[in-house]
Amino acid sequence: MADATSGISVEIRHLFKIFGAEPHKHVEAVRAGLSKTELNEKHHHVLGLRDISIEMPAGGIQVIMGLSGSGKSTLIRHVNRLIEPTAGEVLVGGVDVVKMSEAELRNFRRHRTAMVFQKFALLPHRTVLDNVVFGLELQGVSRTAQLEAAMRWIERVGLKGFENRYPNQLSGGMQQRVGLARALANDAPILLMDEAYSALDPLIRVDMQTVLLDIQKEVRKTIVFITHDLDEALRLGDRIAILRDGEVVQQGTSQDIVLRPADDYIANFVKEVNRGRVVRVGSTMEPLGSEPVSSVTIDAEATIEAAAHLLRAHRLEALTVVDPAGRPLGRIMMRDVLAAMFPEESGEVAKRA
Amino acid sequence: MDWLIRFPHMDDARLAAFKKAIDEGFRAFTRAYGDGIEALFQPLQVFLIQSERLLTTTPWSIVFLVILALAWIGSRNWRIVAGSAVTLLLIGYLDMWQDTMKTVSMIFVCTVLAIAIGLPLGVAMSRSPRLRAVVNPVLDVMQTMPSFVYLIPVVMLLGIGKVPGLIAVVIYAVPPMIRLTDLGIRLVDRDVLEAADAFGASPWQKLVKVQLPLAMPNIMAGINQTIMMALAMVVIAAMIGVQGLGQGVLKAISNQYFTLGLFNGLAIVCIAIIFDRVSQAYGRRLQKHQEAVHG
């Protein structure tokens, strides 16, 4: 699947962002361990991001999650340098965005990245169609090519028939579809989504997540998705980084986050999650024992909720877990499902607290 | 203790010498550069004469129809067009057609000039706080200084005639254009500007595709204000030789012709109303995307 990717890798290395009059003066002190509060009290500078290093694989969805003030929106703006870093590197396909000249940066933004915004940021004086062609217009693509790409994406996000409406004639969900179509029409390998769905109603949000996942199956772009919603993060993220006070607290797959939270802060978050729909069979299965293997099989990528359904439906003790090629990897039993869904309170995390 | 009661002023001889020195200086400046400055404004003179000739020598019926057509294109409103027609016919019937055309021509040239100066200056101000800090007090002076005061140096430099009148009117009428362009551009939603940046817009693309279209309601208000203020200055400009409806008013003041003054004054009011309604309707039409709100 990785060979079908159109995305390119994004690598953030030792990124620092300090807001204030003379940020460069304080980088060394922050590197040496000056705390956010001290920096603020003694030097009246605000620490935005501290030593962020994230490797985002090409063609995957990297979710960056954090509560407000955690620096997640600041972080995503470093990928296309809407915000200048104080120190560090942002490597996109091996090229450092921080070192680009103004013209190179403009070209990079036109062809390599596209962005979707929390408040949609559509052009109110333009129709849906003219909003969607905006990126292509800036690139200088011919009008026919603009319209062709725009119509394709308008149809793909389900806005056919609305081309000539103005943004404020549309609901929030529909406006964000325009935002998504505008970004996709750019055909850039990197898609930046800054809390793109946070302003939408819960039902519409889930709907738009499905739209994104469906489209991602075709385009396989490198998507950076910012959210404050853990359920959204777990549903979309191939990899998730959790940010707190400008620092990465944990990064890994959804399985890592849910099954092995790095600290109590994350454990607290994860407590509320419906684990049945997040934890995958492959993460909780037992090795194949000497006992006879069950004839009913389940994919290692399936959720434990699906496994529980199968176990109930067939009145079985165990299922055989297989890889996509059908080779057995292990087995899963109802007790594994239960253990994954209801971790013991006296577990590792609770003990630490 | 007399100085506490009567303000101690500069002694008379020194004050007179002081004023005289400034006068002499300006007169010397006029003698040295007056011709050069006049030559500089020559293209304006040509523009003014051409536009006035076009409006006054073309048969009234054609001008009348063109004005109504423009009113329709601008407003798409039959009531405004009908109102304009009645007003213009009445003006013509009361034998003020020629004077009205001269005034309309003057206002047209003033407005074009004010836009040509005000739009770029407003854009520049919106980008540079330093420029804004310099220009804003100058605009305050331009708007509050009694217009007679700056008529004097203009007349000394350029003599009596159309061009000095034009300059006086533009000085008075251009500030709202500059201010509202600056304001309009600064009020453009930052989120939308960030989106334009994120998609790689150059500064020029950002200005033309995002900032100016979104500032249009304010810019249109500026144009409307400029037209209204230019019309208000027409009578004062008549004092330095600008022909048109203002001259009738001026004649009426000096000879106490009540009816003449009233007719000319009302004609000015009427064309002001036509300009105002048409330009406002046009501005609203440009903003039609803001009216239909979802929900």
Image (tube, helix red, strand yellow):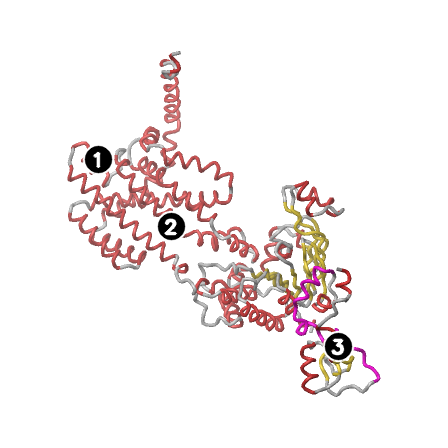
Mark 1 or mark 2: whose residue is earlier in sequence = 2
**Distance from Cα at disc 1 to Cα at disc 2:** 31 Å
Parent chain of label 3: A
Of residue A117 and residue A230, the one placed in the foreground of this image is A230
Mark 3–mark 2 contact, CB under 8 Å?
no
Q: Do labels 1 and 3 share a chain?
A: no
Quadrant where the N terminus of chain A lies?
Answer: bottom right
| Residue at numbered disc 1 | B250
Q: Which chain carries label 2?
A: B
Residue at disc 3, secondary structure: helix
Residue A202 drawn above or below residue B243: below
User: Of helix, strand and loop, which one carries label 2?
Assistant: helix
Can the viewer see residue A78? Answer: no
Pick the front one: B129 or B42: B129
Quadrant where the image shows the C terminus of chain A: bottom right
Is A279 included in the stretch rendered in magenta? Answer: yes
CA neighbours of label 2 inside 10 A, class few (<14), some (14 to 19), many (20+): many
Please say if A225 is above or below A156.
Answer: above
**Could you tell me how far apart the alpha carbons at marks 1 and 3 are, in whole angstroms?**
101 Å
What type is the residue that disc 1 sits on?
Leu
Q: Quadrant of residue A70?
A: bottom right
Viewer-nearest of labels 3 and 2?
3
Q: Which mark is residue B220?
A: 2
Residue B65 magenta-highlighted:
no
The percent coordinates of residue B247 (x first, y second) are 22, 37
| Near-viewer residue (B21 or A40) | A40
Q: Are marks 1 and 2 on the same chain?
A: yes
Quadrant housing residue A11: bottom right
**Which residues lie in the magenta part?**
A263-290
Q: Mark 3 points at which residue?
A: A336
